[in-house]
Amino acid sequence: MLYYYNEKEIDKFYKEDVVFFCNGAGDICIDGKDKKEEDLPEDLRRAYQELWSENTGSYCYLCQFKGKDSITLCNEFSYDADSEWGKMSKKEFESNVFRNARKIADLLGTQADVVVTKEKTPFADLEVYVVMGADVSVEYFNRVANTLYEFIYEVADVPFHLVERKKDLVSMICELEKGETLELSVGDSDYKTSYCVEKMEWKDSCLVLMGGYGGETKSCFLPVASVTTDKSYNETDHEAVKRLVREFCDLVHVKADDFTIEKAAE
C-alpha cells in the first residue's frame, strides 16, 4: 500500500504511526534511551541480526509501523541539494519522487508498504520509506533493497505532474481556459494508457469532455461561463467537474490519483 503524509499530517506519522528502535547507524534506542540488542523484541532482534545493513544504498531502521514490528529502508530527497533533478520545478521534482514511489509500490506487491512523507526539516523535502514486516526473508529484503537502488532516483523523461488527490485533478480541470486541453496517463512508459480532458466553448457556455482509450468518454456542461481571467471558478462548475471526474474514473476503473499530468508546470 502507498501512504502519503503531507505537511499537516507529518506529525501524525512521527507521533502516532511509527516508532523507531534504531537510527541509520544501527544504534539501538528505545523510549529515548540507549539500549542493547538483547533489549529488542524477539522479531526485531532477529531482523537486526539477519537483515539490518548499512550497505543497501538506503537508510535502514527498525521500527513499529501502525503497531507492527517492521524493518524499513528510507531515502531522502532535497530539491536544493539533488542536482540530478536538472531543471525541474519544485512541483515536478515532488511529482517525480511520487512517481518513483508508486512504481516501487507496484513492483513490490503486498508484502511491503511504501510511505511518502513531506518533511518540515531543512535537510529533506521528501522521504520515501519502504516498510516490511520484521519477519520477511533475507531474499525479499534484498529484493526490496535492489528495487529501491534501481528506481528510487530515476528521473522521468518528460515533465509531468502527479495528481496527489482527486480534488487536485478537479481544480486543474476547472482552471483550464476554454480551448485548452489536459493530457492524462495511467501506468509507466511500457504500459501507459492515455486520456484527455478538453474544455470547449458551447454557445455562450462551456462543455468539458473527458475521454480517450477505447472511445470511453464522459462530459459535463457548465451553464455558467467557466473561468474568468483570474482563474477563479464558481461552486456550481466545481461540483459539475467533480461529478465528471468521479464518473469517468468509475468508467475506466482507475482512481483519480493514479493519473499523471503530461503537461509541464508554468
Image (cartoon, rainbow, N blue to C red):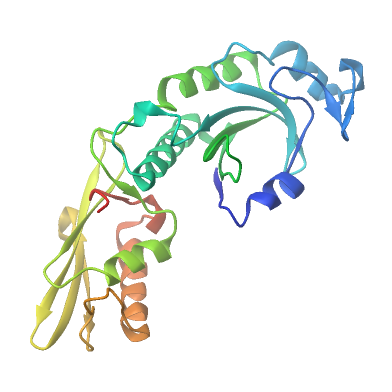
Whether residue 73 sits left or right of residue 194 in the image: it is right
Q: Residue at x 31, y 41 (%)?
A: 187
Residue 113 rendering spot, x and y as whole percentages: 58, 37
Whether 13 is drawn above or below 132: the answer is below
Name the quadrant containing residue 170.
Answer: bottom left
User: Looking at the image, is 246 positioned above or below residue 32?
Assistant: below
The quadrant of the image that shows the C terminus is bottom left
For the question of whether residue 216 can be seen, the reply is no
- Nearest the viewer among 205 and 194 is 205
Q: Quadrant of the N terminus?
A: top right
Residue 143, percent from left and from top: 52, 18
Is 17 drawn above or below residue 54 in the view shown? Answer: below
Question: Which image quadrant for residue 168?
Answer: bottom left
The single residue placed furthest to the left in the displayed view is 203
Query: Residue at (16%, 81%) from the top-left corner?
Result: 206
Report x, y in % for residue 75: 54, 28
Residue at the location (70% across, 52% down)?
Answer: 12
Expressed as whole percent of the image width and height from the top left, the position of residue 35 reads 90, 22
